[in-house]
Image (spheres, helix red, strand yellow):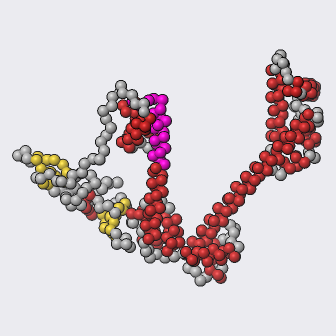
Amino acid sequence: MKSVKEATKSDYEVLCDSQGREYYYNKKTRVSSFAKPDVLKGSDEQFEQNPWIECRSSKGKMFYHNTVTKESRWIKPKNINTLNKTELCGIGTSMKITDAEVSQYLINRLIEQYNISGMKDGLYKLSTESIFRAIDIRNRNEILRKCLTDKEAREMDERHRMQKYYVDEICKMKVEAPDFFGFNNVLSKHPYYIGIENKFACYEEYIQNNEGGVTRSELELIFHNYGVELSTSVIEVLGLNEVQKFDRKDVLLAFIKYFKALQRKFMINIQNVKSEMICNANRWKAPFVSMLEDMYRKGRIHYKMKFKNAFHVFKDSKPFQELLAGDEDIKEIYFKFMNDLEHRLGRYIQGRDREVVPDATDRRAIDMYFQSIQEEKEEGEI
């Protein structure tokens, strides 16, 4: 792709939008801009990049040559651009920068100077940079990461702002087009429209602001009265007698918006149901665990008791039946309860040689534990 400096005058086409503003369209790069390209400017106009170079004649006299317009002058031009910023330099490797604010400012300048796009790219490009190495090694990576995060957030905010600005400017225009494809074709070379990422959303906004305000409300009311659902097809909607008086384009656009609203509502309802199920499961889980604890204290269940044997003990209980309504794994809850018992027994064994609080250990659990081990040995399971 050629740059603007390498392009010729024949590469550009001067167009006007509906508001009479001129813009320039590059037929090769398919890029539009309201700013006049350097190649179309005269020698006395202001250039984005300085095109003047110093030359000497065969007799040694200084003259100035414009590389864009190919014009030469003896007198130095007054409108030569100068750089607004200079590169950072002059800091030696022996210097140390410890101030956080100064470090952040310098790293932001380095990010701009080296055109750093990410953390990996930054560490690679700045690994030999004396300014970056002068910043405290304990903080510079974190400062770089923070500066890159802030830069990304600023760019995203600027992109959203520019997208909104482009859409608002397009909506102010008068576009004669029967549908989205015609709308897209008419504005395909406009610089604002080229910069819009979601062009169909722009078309929807344009229709709503210029044509579909009252119409869409009437159609939505018809859809609601007819009972349009997610399972309703567009053919059914177009076949309704009530929508025949409206333009087909308006009906389709209104149906798309109504359908998307139904989808959003459906997904929100699913999330609410899931959240409610989780809350109910947690509410029913606690009574079930309390019931297991109570059965354990009474000796109805014991450590190492198999789930199939314990199931016959609590299958008729109310907490168990309430827990069945949720999506919790009852086996998992039971095994977690048994693991907790194992930790309690482990703490007892570790503290056998120390003074033990009488209420802290359930000796019946110890007896049942060794009894179950013996039974499993006799059955050949161990």
Left or right: 137 in relation to 82? right
Magenta region: 134-153
Q: Is residue 11 visible?
A: no
Residue at position x 94%, y 33% in the image = 299
Q: Quadrant of the rendered structure where residue 239 is?
A: bottom right
Residue 362 in picture, x, y percent from top left: 89, 27
**In the image, is residue 162 above or below residue 282?**
below
Q: Is residue 347 left or right of residue 109?
A: right
Regarding residue 379, the answer to whether it shows in the image is yes
Total numbered circles: 0
The answer to whether residue 169 is left or right of residue 267 is left
Question: Quadrant where the C terminus lies?
Answer: top right
Q: Is residue 227 above or below residue 319?
A: below
Instruction: Please identify the residue farthest to the left as the structure is shown.
Output: 59
- Whether residue 74 is situated above or below residue 188 in the rendered picture: above
- Quick one: 177 or 107, which is closer to the camera? 107
